[in-house]
Image: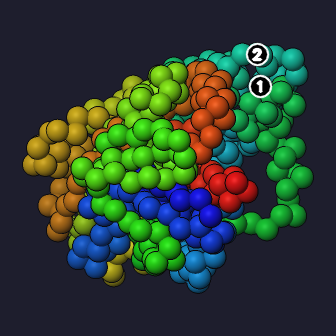
Amino acid sequence: MPSVAIVGGGISGLATAHYLAKAGIASHLFEARPRLGGVIQTERVDGCVVEGGPDSFLSAKPWAMELIAELGLAGEVIGSNDHLRATFIWKGGKLIPLPDGVQFLVPTQLRPIAATPLLHWRTKLRMGLEYFHRRGRAGADDRTVADFVAGHYGQEVVDYLAEPLLSGIYGGDPAELSAASVLPNLVELEREYGSLTRGVLARRKAAAHEEKLPLFRTLRGGMAQLIAGLSSAVAGKATVVHAAVERIERTANGFRLCAGGDWLEAQRVVLACEAHQVAGLTRPIDTELSALTGWIPYRSSMTVALGYNRSDLQHPLNGFGFLVPKKERNRLVACTWVGTKFSDRAPDGMALLRCFLGEALDERDEQIIAAVLIELREMMGVRARPRFTRIFRWPRSMAQYTVGHAQRVARIEERLAAIPGLHVVGNGYRGIGIPDCVRMAKQVAERIARG
Ligand SMILES: Cc1cc2nc3c(=O)[nH]c(=O)nc-3n(C[C@H](O)[C@H](O)[C@H](O)COP(=O)(O)OP(=O)(O)OC[C@H]3O[C@@H](n4cnc5c(N)ncnc54)[C@H](O)[C@@H]3O)c2cc1C
């Protein structure tokens, strides 16, 4: 069996270690932080389950759920309360519900679109007429998400739907993100049907008999339960070293890695750290690979959790939360009403809000909380002081799939094919969410096991 070193102990690195262990392959896993999980971090505060990073995963992508079942945690999974699902958009000083029937960005019902104050009548007309788009409009080259969405539904849909929805997922800008990499399903529908609305309606009809899954899933104890499950599963098979890998060199048999002043030899190396880290570590090995991974931009993000006495909030918390479009934004990007989205996240009599903010991570905690409280007061009428607050900072953690991303990743894979034994996995390449990270980890482990 080959000796394997994994760099990075987030979900990508841990899942790789797990799938290798299943194939009977031991590994050394290096993690720079004092804890495992990467951006997955759950705390229990005042009886509340507080997520610092991701709070759930998409049910539609099966790989996270498969892993959870393998770990014996399927009984711990809870689904989102989709019967209470409503998302509000902050516009013109009001929280306006996203009209019914909007599936991601695509309108599928006329009446709610016609009635919403979120969009101008010109946009509504354009959204209706999109139904008649014919095939053949698709551009061959990659486009920005902004160009793609505006081409179908107009700029207002970019500003008030695409931008806030994607900010929540990527912290990214539709004028830079790649339609092919970020909206692959919609690009495929465009190719097949011309109209996205017609495409979504046709697919929905075809899927009518399929089992209806909750949109999101999580674990009763929070996403860190997955990390704890993985850590136990790999115990004795993966040796975890809490040190940053500083340098990797090629040897006659594979590689040697330097971490905390010690060197370790390994025949295979899996780089499960952020692409900007990969860029630094691969510079002595392959300058083109280093440059390509270095080109993948990352944004920073921050989440702020606030626990309240429920009686101190007058707001009905009648949905999953709200998004703030860039055009209307001060600091707040989004806010999740945690107890509505998932049950059992806060004890009776308490309410938990989870706010997302963008860059500016070096600001002092008091300033951040003060800024959040001002905006919550304006947007939700919250005047009370929270019982507790928690701030989680995630520097350069959200990969941005900008135009040309798929070609860059294909080239990265070509370079890797020329360096036997070196692999990359993680949110910088072929999927940002947890299920995609698990899928990539499994594929890398299978490739290593095949030899
Ligand atoms: C705030 C936030 C909310 C999110 N919400 C969701 C969500 O709800 N659902 C969802 O599916 N996805 C969500 N995501 C995305 C998803 O969580 C991440 O893409 C995924 O967890 C990334 O896992 P990873 O292992 O690839 O990277 P990371 O979690 O970033 O882990 C990489 C690890 O590598 C370590 N490392 C880096 N360099 C070195 C080195 N030289 N030596 C040793 N270790 C090193 C780092 O310390 C880190 O622990 C969210 C992300 C963020 C930041």
Residue 166, x across and y down, in percent: 51, 37
Q: Secondary structure at mark 1?
A: helix
Residue 351, x across and y down, in percent: 31, 69
> Compared to 370, does 134 lie above or below?
above
User: In this view of the protein, can residue 116 be seen by the observer?
Assistant: no
Q: Amino acid at mark 1?
A: Glu
Q: Amino acid at mark 2?
A: Gly
N-terminal label among 2 and 1:
1
> Compared to 399, does 267 lie above or below?
below
> Compared to 87, does 145 lie above or below?
above
Question: Observer-nearest residue: 112 or 377?
Answer: 377
Q: Quadrant of the N terminus?
A: bottom right
Along the horizontal axis of the image, is 404 left or right of 372? right
Q: What colouring method underlies this structural image?
A: rainbow
Q: Residue at image x 59%, y 82%?
A: 72
Residue 297, x across and y down, in percent: 44, 28
User: In this view of the protein, can residue 260 be seen by the observer?
Assistant: yes
In the picture as drawn, the residue positioned furthest to the front comes out as 252
Question: Observer-nearest residue: 292 or 59?
Answer: 292
Along the horizontal axis of the image, is 113 left or right of 348? right
Q: Residue under label 2, please give it.
A: 139
Q: Residue at image x 74%, y 66%?
A: 212
Which quadrant of the figure has residue 84?
Answer: bottom right
How far apart are the two marked residues, 2 and 1, measured between alpha carbons? 16 Å
Q: Residue at image x 62%, y 40%?
A: 420
Q: Residue under label 1, please give it.
A: 130
Residue 202, x across and y down, in percent: 87, 44
